[in-house]
Image (cartoon, rainbow, N blue to C red):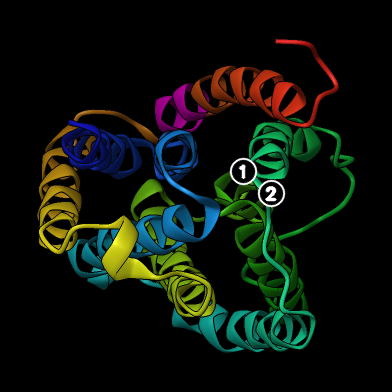
């Protein structure tokens, strides 16, 4: 039953990401972390989000800003190298606390700071920060959003460009945490194609909704949704870390 829940959660959160370009991966990582060990959650989440974001790359392939990818990738691989050296594995309390905190940390960035992803040094910084968030918490959408606030990209360009950088990050996370997981014991073989199909279907459904909303509503609804989820996850993280008595 729990593995069916993982598939349904993948479908629903891929639909959410397909509409809002945020919140879906954050919610999904929370669901996976409730049910699985952290390495298993990281691997399955990495697979689901690689497919989910990868399908959005294809759907919005005519709106991609390729100039972002090279500096972003350099930052991502620097972080991967550091994690390989440290052999660090996160824990459930830290995952929930970080995921929940990211949306609020994003709001604390002064508006005077121009973190526009279209500037190459900012794209490199984004690769460093976002990949660190992915490796520690599994999800990094609210952190990545910081680098799009000041950009002039349309909702279609945001969906496509975020998707290609997120695909890279999730591939890095998946490969790294796979070394800490005995997959044959914890995850049945059928869950992988099920999650892949659910991720693609959810994005296809979201594509039909995104055409019915404007850029302003697209950004506003996503912001409120992700803050609400953040509050829930902060509470869960504090409980897991023993800060709050359950």
Task: Give how far across and how far down residue 99 sits, in percent.
Answer: 64, 39
Task: Give how far across and how far down residue 100 sits, in percent.
Answer: 66, 31
Q: Nearer the viewer, residue 53 or 11?
A: 11
Q: Is residue 186 left or right of residue 41?
A: left
Quarter residue 68 falls in = bottom right
Quarter residue 10 falls in = top left
Above or below, 188 relative to 64: above
Disc on res. 142:
1
Q: Nearer the viewer, residue 104 or 170?
A: 170
Res 91 seen here: yes
Assess whether mark 2 and mark 1 are in contact (beta carbons under 8 angstroms). yes
The residue under label 2 is: 146
Magenta residues (range) = 216-222
Choose mark 1 or mark 2, whichever is in front.
1
Tell me what residue is drawn at x 54 percent, y 23 percent: 229
Q: Nearer the viewer, residue 61 or 164?
A: 164
Q: Quadrant of the C terminus?
A: top right
Label the magenta part by its dominant secondary structure.
helix
Tell me what residue is drawn at x 50 percent, y 80 percent: 179
């Amino acid at each position: 039953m729990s593995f069916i829940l993982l598939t349904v959660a993948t479908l629903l959160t891929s639909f959410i990401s397909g509409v809002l370009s945020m919140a879906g991966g954050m919610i999904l990582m929370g669901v996976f972390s409730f049910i699985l060990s952290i390495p298993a959650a990281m691997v399955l989440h990495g697979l689901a989000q690689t497919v989910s974001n990868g399908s959005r790359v294809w759907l919005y392939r005519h709106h991609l800003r390729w100039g972002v990818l090279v500096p972003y990738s350099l930052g991502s691989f620097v972080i991967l190298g550091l994690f390989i050296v440290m052999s660090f594995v996160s824990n459930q309390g830290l995952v929930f606390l970080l995921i929940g905190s990211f949306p609020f940390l994003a709001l604390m960035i002064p508006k005077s700071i121009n973190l526009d992803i279209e500037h190459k040094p900012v794209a490199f910084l984004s690769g460093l920060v976002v990949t660190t968030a992915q490796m520690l918490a599994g999800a990094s959408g609210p952190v990545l959003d910081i680098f799009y606030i000041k950009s002039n990209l349309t909702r279609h360009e945001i969906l496509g460009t975020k998707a290609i950088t997120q695909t890279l990050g999730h591939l890095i996370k998946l490969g790294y945490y796979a070394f800490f997981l005995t997959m044959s014991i914890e995850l049945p073989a059928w869950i992988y194609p099920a999650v892949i199909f659910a991720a693609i279907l959810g994005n296809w459904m979201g594509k039909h909704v995104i055409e019915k909303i404007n850029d302003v509503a697209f950004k506003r609804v996503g912001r409120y949704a992700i803050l609400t989820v953040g509050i829930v996850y902060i509470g869960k993280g504090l409980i897991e870390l023993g800060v709050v008595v359950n």
